[in-house]
Image (cartoon, rainbow, N blue to C red):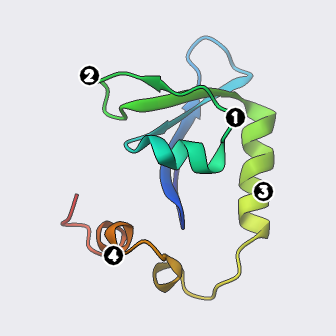
Amino acid sequence: MWLFAKHGFLSIVQHRNQPSVLMVRARVADDIRYYFPQAQILVNDAADYRYCANIRRGDVVARIAAITAAIDYDKFKPAIDDHDRRAPYTNPQIE
């Protein structure tokens, strides 16, 4: 699952060997830190998503529910305060 949020872009998938754990992955470590500040972030320079944290499924579900409950805008892109982040979110040609 991809999660585009005001403070980060995350890729979330099931851990290959631990079904009760989700791998929260990002290209920017601070994206994981913002939403999961207690997570231990692993670094893999060869991976598509350089940063990864293995987090209990229930913790991820609870955090995503809280993110959803905190939505306070009627348009997503203008709600992004970080202008460096807004550009790639609004123009798919920019990475």
Q: For mark 4, what is the residue?
A: 90
Indicate whether 28 appears above or below 57: below
**Residue 24 on image: x %, y %:** 56, 36
Q: Is residue 83 visible?
A: yes
Decide: is 82 above or below 49.
below
Category of crowding for the residue at label 2, using alpha-carbon neighbours closer than 10 angstroms: few (below 14), some (14–19), many (at least 20):
few
Q: Which secondary structure, mark 4? A: helix
State which tag comes first along the sequence, 1 or 2. 1
The C terminus lies in which quarter of the figure? bottom left
Which label's residue is closer to the chain start, 4 or 3? 3
Badge 1 element: loop
The three-letter code of the residue at mark 3 reads: Ala
Q: Are dots 4 and 1 in contact, CB under 8 Å?
A: no
- Mark 1 sits on what residue? 38
* Residue 28 image position (x, y, % from top left): 40, 45
Residue pointed to by mark 2: 46
Where residue 50 appears, as percent x and y from the top left, is 36, 31
Residue 51's place in the image compared with 94, above or below, is above
Residue drawn at the location 69% of the way across and 34% of the way down: 38
The image quadrant that residue 44 belongs to is: top left
Crowding around mark 4 (Cα neighbors within 10 Å: few <14, some 14 to 19, many 20+) is few
Q: Helix, strand, or loop for circle 3?
A: helix
Q: CA distance from mark 3 to mark 1?
A: 17 Å
